Amino acid sequence: MSSAWRVGRGRSATSTTAKFRTWNSKQRIGQLPPPPPHHPRFHVRLRHCFSVHWLSQVPREAVDKGSAAYNRGKVFVHGASEATGAAYRRQFQSDLSRFLRRRAAELKLGGVMFLLCLGRPAADPTDQGRVKLLYGTPFEDSWADLVREGLMESGRMDNFNVPLYAPTLDEVREAVAAAGAFRINRLARW
């Protein structure tokens, strides 16, 4: 399933950015650098993106052996424990809210952003619907085969998780509200 939403720029933002910055080795992939304060406002009327279902990182709890959310024997949130699902949901909410705040700084007041992402109809975060067929099942089956054949230790599989989360429409609404910089003009699932 896919979810699409279009958000229109609401109020003005305090941070601005006009240039891409180079990544240094201490930054994680998906981590957005703060905008430099001395750059002029970047006036964009339209932004689009198809990647917000990818998380900036796997939730720490999912790979912490002492956590209730430890994702033992799985590499994806689908079919995981309730605690693992909640950890992935929190990570998605945080990532999308941060993404929207950063994009608000780039859009001209009244500008529009169109986002398209993988989504799911079920309220349960551990039921990722058809997304499991794209990312969950192939990874888990491949890792399980490597462990079963003795080519990989099971502990290595337990420490690998796909950083992807397919949200519901309500979860998208919550993240947009938390960001506070946009309003939803249209939100649909197909």
Image: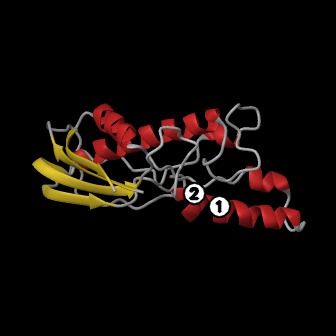
Asked whether the viewer can see residue 78, the reply is: yes
Q: Amino acid at mark 1?
A: Thr
Q: Nearer the viewer, residue 22 or 99?
A: 99
Q: Nearer the viewer, residue 20 or 145?
A: 145
Q: Amino acid at mark 2?
A: Lys
Crowdedness of circle 2 by 10 Å Cα count: few (<14), some, many (20+)? some
Residue at image point 80% right, 66% down: 145
Quadrant in the rendering for residue 44: bottom left
Cα separation, mark 1 vs mark 2, equals: 6 Å
Residue at image point 34% right, 57% down: 190
Tag 2, which secondary structure? helix
- Residue hosting label 2: 132
At which x and y percent is residue 37? 24, 44
Question: As displayed, is residue 142 above or below residue 185?
Answer: below
- Residue hosting label 1: 137
Q: Earlier in the sequence, mark 1 or mark 2?
A: 2
Asked whether the viewer can see residue 19, the reply is: no
Residue contact between numbered discs 1 and 2, judged by CB atoms under 8 Å: yes
At which x and y percent is residue 105? 22, 46
